[in-house]
Amino acid sequence: MPNLLVNHPTIRSYRRDRKNLFRASFVLFRQLTQKGQVFSLSHREDHSLRMLDNLGVFLSAAGSQRILIPAIALHDVGVFHTHEICHGPVSAELVRPHLPSLGLHQDEVEKVCSAIRAHDDKSFVDDSKEARALRVLDSIDAFGELGVYRFLEVYCRRGLTPPDMFVRALASLERRRQMVPTDLFRPADNWLINSAYSKAKEIMQLMLDGFHGKPVPGYAAEVYKALEIIDWDVYDNKKLEKIIHDAKSPSARDFFLKLWAELFTTQ
């Protein structure tokens, strides 16, 4: 999902204490993920950076930045330490001992851990502004061309294959759309969110229909095969440039150009 229309104050305009918290949170993310035995291209730092870039969509409804900055930066640490789908509780327990070193008070530590756990643990309820913002921002990053890539990379890593991965991706995409309320955003941002959701759904449905032999535009299959060929590593600029250059259809080339723009323009 590309950055929305709002101009979220990125690290350059944070107060000094927020800048320090921002940097320290991502340093901790790198330290903890490097110790893991699992690797996920879709849960690298750029995912959390896009979430922070879109934080402004909530206007004043997102809650405390002292809670949200570390919660967003660290919410997926558990992905690198477990093969379980529900990784929020693992993330929370891994980061808890380190949060005081970020300058957080004990009550803030508990709020950060609660928001992190609740972002994907359906058995755990946290209705705070911060936890809600984390869930919504995480869902928004599953939309658009980048969302398609992230779904497929994750499901491939979990050992799923077509058509099951497409069916599950469509179901997860719909659940994530239901998590994103429309009453919090500006009309222009709502339009962007809906457009990105619709695009992800369209592409995923085309892939599913094509697998079942239905007559559909061929670019969706071309996209999937190209991602398989490069082993999903779109972060290798040369590989991505090559599949853009070799794309047979304008629609496939457009998909990869948008993917390139979303990946390499993250601040």
Image (tube, rainbow, N blue to C red):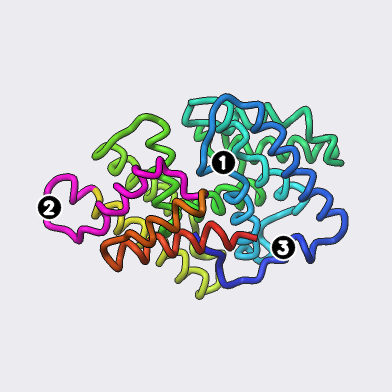
Q: Which residue is mark 1?
A: 119
Residue extent of the magenta highlight: 208-235
Looking at the image, residue 223 sits to the left or right of residue 70; the answer is left
Q: In the rendered structure, which amino acid carries the disc numbered 2?
A: Lys
Residue drawn 32% across and 47% down?
Answer: 170
Q: Which residue is mark 3?
A: 10
Upstream in sequence: badge 1 or badge 3: 3
Q: Quadrant of residue 155?
A: top left
Residue 231 on the magenta span: yes
Evaluate whether residue 159 shows in this view.
Answer: yes
Q: Quarter of the image containing the C terminus?
A: bottom right
Residue 54 on the magenta span: no
Q: Nearer the viewer, residue 107 or 113?
A: 113
* Mark 2: few/some/many CA within 10 Å (<14, 14-19, 20+): few
* Mark 1: few/some/many CA within 10 Å (<14, 14-19, 20+): many
Q: Quadrant of residue 114?
A: top right
Q: Residue furthest bottom?
A: 188
